[in-house]
Amino acid sequence: MTSYLLRRLVYALVILLAVNLLTFMLFFVVNTPDDMARMQLGSKRVTPEAIERWKQEKGYDKPRWHNPEAPGIEQFTRTIFFEKSVRLFLFEFGNDIDGRSIRGEILDRAGPSLALAVPVFLVGLALNVTFALAMALFRASVLDLWGVVVCIALMSISSLFYIISGQYLVSKAFALVPISGFSGGWDALRFLALPILVGVAAGIGSGTRFYRTLFLEEMGRDYVRTARAKGLPESAVMFRHVLRNALIPILTGVVAVIPTLFMGSLIAESFFGVPGLGSYTIDAIQSQDFSVVRSMVYLGSVLYIVGLVLTDISYTLVDPRVRFE
Amino acid sequence: MSSPLLRVEGLVTTVENGSGPRVPVIDGVSFDVRRGETLALVGESGCGKSMTALSLVRLLPDAAQAVAGRVLLEGVDLLGLPEAAMRDVRGRRMAMIFQEPGTSLNPVLTLGEQIGEVLRRHADPGSRATERSRVIELLQSVGIAEPAQRVDEYPFQLSGGMRQRAMIAMALALEPDVLIADEPTTALDVTIQAQVLELLRDLQRRRGTAIVLITHDLGVVASMADRIGVMYAGQLVEVATRKAFLSGALHPYSRKLLAAIPAFARRADGLAVIRGQVPAPGTVWSGCRFADRCEEVLSSCRDALPTLIGDAERHAVRCFRAVLGEGVDLPAADPTLMLREGEVRRDAIVAEALHAAAQPDARKPLLVLEGLRVHFPIRRGLLRRTVGHVRAVDGVSLEIGRGQTLALVGESGCGKTTVGKAILGLTAATAGRVCFDGEDLAQLGRSALRRYRRRVQIVFQDPFGSLDPRMQVSELVKEGLRAQSIGISEAERDARVRRLLDQVGLPASAMRRYPHEFSGGQRQRLAIARALAVEPDLIVCDEPTSALDVSVQAQVLNLLRELQRALGLSYLFITHNLAAVEFIADRVAVMYLGRIVEEGAVQAVLRDPRHPYTQALLSAVPGVGEQSDRIVLAGEIPSPVNPPSGCSFHPRCPKAQPACREQVPNAIRLADDHYAACQLLAPRSAL
Amino acid sequence: MKIVLLWSDGLLWGLVLVGLLLVTQVRRHEHLAVPWRRVGQSRVAMACLPVLLFFVCVGLLDSMHFRPQLERAPGAAASPGTAVAAPAAPVYSVEVLSALDQVLKTLRASRERTYSAPLATHAYVKESIDRPDGTTVREFPRLAHAGMGLAAPVTPASVAADLLERGAIGALAGGGGWMLVMLLLAWVVRGEGGLLAIVRDTTSLRWRAALAALLVLLVVTGVLGAWALEYHVLGTDKVGQDVLYLALKSVRTALVIGTLTTVVMLPLALALGIAAGYLQGWVDDAVQFVYTTLNSIPSVLLIAAAVLLMQVFIDGHADLFQTTAERADLRLLFLCVILGLTSWTGLARLLRAEALKLRELEYVQAARALGVSSLGIMAGHVARNAMHLAIITLAMEFSGLVLAEAVLSYIGVGVDPSMISFGSMINAARLELSREPAVWWSLAAAFSFMFVLVLAANLLADAVRDAFDPRVAGLRGAR
């Protein structure tokens, strides 16, 4: 197990290195810092001096890979690659365009992001699994057939529609909760109720359909027939046998997603004015703040890989076949 | 005579058929089973055997439904019971064992949980502790070693045979009145099958359980059944006691099934075959459902459906010839009609031996294996270091002469398939040599290897997995021609394909069709045609008939023999089916855990087995003769990762001596062409 | 008129050509046709067919581009002196139009000043209007291109009567067209019993469902079309553009994104997924590494980063593009490429797993034993037998991509702002609901067009999955 985890960790580092190289290529090789400066400064004030000044301010005035003028080891550390990419490994993200520490921003914004993402995820999961179980239990009945159609219809609606119409109906037409905004403490609930509702509603179609397929697949297996041959009632077959087996992919899938919840949800946050990482990312994209985008790419990769490792670990915990290997 | 425990009357089960009307798959089946009796339902696949079993316990798939008839368990009609009452019957009064113990057990629950569940469902087992001890008792009673430990294990930690024992423990937990066993040993090896059948017999003797045994294996039937029901196209065509059935089956279908079983004595004439194939559900019949395939068909057979005539307790048959009292010209004098009837006439053996000797070049070997080893590394740890080897093949030396058939026999996991792959160059040999016609396979370069592939070909077991479902037949057969650049023009290749199809007995019209349009047997013919296309000298036949019904198996075996005679082919016939070996092989090698334990002329090895493993293997094959000295091997094949020291068979060997543990036995020459690797057979002086 | 072939036009028509070729192939090979016939036996799928065909036709019409020749001053052409002179080189408009624009000429030209509600005859907001008598009043001004044929005092009743009359004519026209199609179809399936068989739904493919959907579609189109000649059926937006026109123009963008992305994705996924699964060893390691790396980057961020870079490139090389349409088209294509690059991993993973399974199958072993090369086996056996996965994935991916376009354009990393798409429509209208009174029709139009398109695609994809996926077939049997 430990050797396995070690191997995973080494692999994760290699992947992060690749991610870093890829983003570095995208941001500094395909487009030069000059292009970036020109875009940031706007076309009106572009003079070579202004560009140089901008680059110097932001620390983009060094060579990319290798600095022959610097002494010793600094030949490699006083470069854009080292300062902008390698430091990401230490979670030193630098400052954003307004000069604030990106790390500080991330720490501040993770809370609101989680306050929205976690309830959406948990409530959504509970509802999806429940609906899927009901549909699988009454498979091929009217409930199931229409359930599938409703799921597909729900899936066909743009997430933007859920947000916009939810906002319009609940906050404007019925004036139940504030349209947007955020505050700390219990007051947050008032602000979060609507985004959570919208988030859950948006995911219900695809989620329910996915779990229903999972359950049906499990129900077609031979051991289900064996369980029935024992004389077990259908509910026992469903909960003791089918659910128990289906829980393995459900749980491991959940574990893979949990770390990425940190990243927040892009559109919902910016729409509802939640000061989380999602809206931070959107703002950065719209203001073309590359250092924030790069940091978020890195953070996202780290969280994804953590999810991968957690998935592997959770398999060994819940699946006896893997546990005893 | 006591009233029957289970009585089935006029059972009709139908299945959905797309948007069309429902189609019957069981059409008026009636039979009785008494306490302590075993009724076997036999027939080819697609005859409705399993559907019958599932109808009895009402566990049919959603698309199927029992629509008429009665299933009376001590007078209570199960089909009329509400579902809740039926659940009380399942598991307590009627239990079931399925074919695949691997998938039929819940993979994430321990044996204790799964077996305890039955106890809890139907009876109050009291405390957890008493439930647990009862489960342990049950595991013990089905012969699972260390039951107190096994009770907390998961199914995947058990071998196939052990899983089936656990299934049996589960089924018999509440001592049901009726046990329905649907192909309980089909997925198991023959020595394990012998163990499981022995267990079922033993449990039945002690508890008086009635067993409905579903099987396609007439050998199993002969060793287990008290009465036999033959099913064809959803109907029972013959019901008889075992004795009556084996000594005088009346229905032409039953007789053909029996005559299709390969045996040594049938080598000269070939095996009986049933033309055509099992009709699909939904076929409309006007008369006897077997009429189209029957060689003794009367004109009346096509007009009306015969009824089951006779006393179902002793012998009843659904055939107009029986009605007419024609006695149905039973070839009672033909000893070949009986299963492994014991001694075959000596002159037959002599004639066969003469025939083998007369083969051209039989003595100059075509293929020689010298100390072949194939080891697969096991990698573990951070750096994926090799920590051990799976010794799939561990020192095999063999010879195959020109025009000869060598059968390689053994149970699953013994390495016989790996030998075949190594010969084809699909798996690299770790050590030893594969010499074909004087050339060492390992020395061949790329193009030489491609040329070599023209000379050695393969036919696989699964007629559905071995043909690409998306290729037309002509493309399939041409694949080898293209790869080997045989034939210049497409027309030339087409002509060749037509000739090949003709050779394997398929019409030229098959060329533009796709594999799924053919039956299992026809597909196996296609696979043979594909192999023949490149004109090989040697064909490795890897279990070519194991997935086929007995009548279809007969067709394929006949074809292989004819082709050998016509083209002078050599075969390496890999199988676990000893009856097929008897029919087709000249020489036989028995393999155990990567090594050859006995080798020699087929009649020498099969009639006079000397190695204890061969003896056990032969005795495990179920047959009619009441062998008093039935050897049932204990335990299972050990893992090839860590084979036992010395003679790898010693842990299971009933005759093992202390010396066997230490010394790897060498092959000992017992007769002109008969070798065995067992120290006990060595001359005294060698020990 | 100068024909303009945009890159995406060429690719889209190329795709249509490939599609037609594939259809003839499928028709010729029974085993390929079988699953498609199963699709055709699904009523839902057949009902989706006319809807999707309608969208495809709109999109293809909108993919035939040209630049109209600018008319010279009419006086100059009439003067006899210039008639004999050598004609000057024709001058073309910088505006690129499409055949669809030509069909919807009235919609495109009938521009109002600002918002107007669906089917309204007056604007949505009051304006100060100078009366001829010199006074200024604030009232809802009469629209310039709506209800022109109505008599002077326009009352709700007169509008309703006009709409009813026009609607009836439109519905009749739609119904008439439907009758023609039905008769044509009856002739096509005359072997199966013709019209009667369709009515009884006993045809092998569920034509009745398709016809029913077509009837609804044609009648709705007829009614809307009849109204659109004289009204703004879905209102106008902030700058007075007809919303129906915008919605129809958005269809092409959605189709291009949904289809051309797969052109990028499919070859990558097929080649890498199958090679990884079949060849194993270092190829497998490398492919797995690449797709784990790509997967680990949040796809929105990767797309955003790439699109931002693209923007930088376009800004720096403005001289490369003759028209805005060409620039927008390049950005659209680039978006497809980026979406393809981020979405091939899922399919590649499935194909790799399938190739792993297939390589152990006996027909692959048999091919190796016959001396067929690895490449031959991968192309001849593995790819062919894993194709159902590709088909299922492509069908399901389409709707996802259409939805993704809206989100990306909304964030500002989607299509060029000058390109009409569902996303840019929503983006432009994002704050309209909070106006007082709310302007809802732009959003409603974008969402409902998108919903119909995506729903039809999703339902068809579901039927395709049912027909192609052997596992689903197994589930069906167990039911």
Image: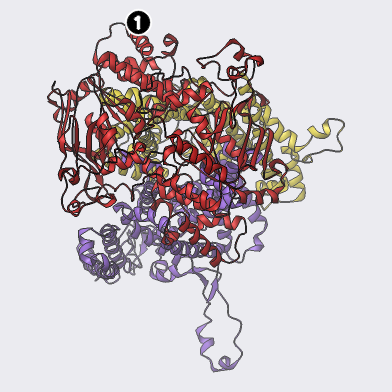
Chain colours: A yellow, B red, C purple
Q: Quadrant of the C terminus of chain B?
A: top right
Q: Taking B195 as reference, is C479 above or below it?
A: below
User: Pointer 1: residues within 10 angstroms few (<14), some, or many (20+)?
Assistant: few
- Does residue B328 appear in this view? yes
Element under label 1? helix
Where residue C254 sits in the image (x, y, percent)?
Answer: 46, 55
Q: Quadrant of the N terminus of chain B?
A: top left
Where residue C457 sits in the image (x, y, percent)?
Answer: 39, 52
Q: Is residue C110 left or right of residue A296?
A: left
Q: Is residue C204 left or right of residue C383?
A: left
User: Which residue is located at x 63 percent, y 15 percent?
Assistant: B684
- Does residue C338 appear in this view? no
Q: Quadrant of residue A1?
A: top right
User: Which residue is located at x 29 percent, y 27 percent?
Assistant: B225
| Pick the front one: A205 or B242 | B242
Q: Is residue A44 left or right of residue A169?
A: right
Where residue A149 sits in the image (x, y, percent)?
Answer: 31, 44
Where residue A227 sits in the image (x, y, percent)?
Answer: 31, 24
Q: Quadrant of residue A126?
A: top left
What kind of residue is marked 1? Ala
How many numbered marks have been drawn onto this rendered protein structure? Answer: 1
| Pick the front one: C187 or B261 | B261
Q: Which residue is mark 1?
A: B129
| Pick the front one: C405 or B397 | B397
Q: Taking B32 as reference, is C403 above or below it?
A: below
User: Which residue is located at x 52 percent, y 49 percent?
Assistant: B564
Disc 1: which chain? B
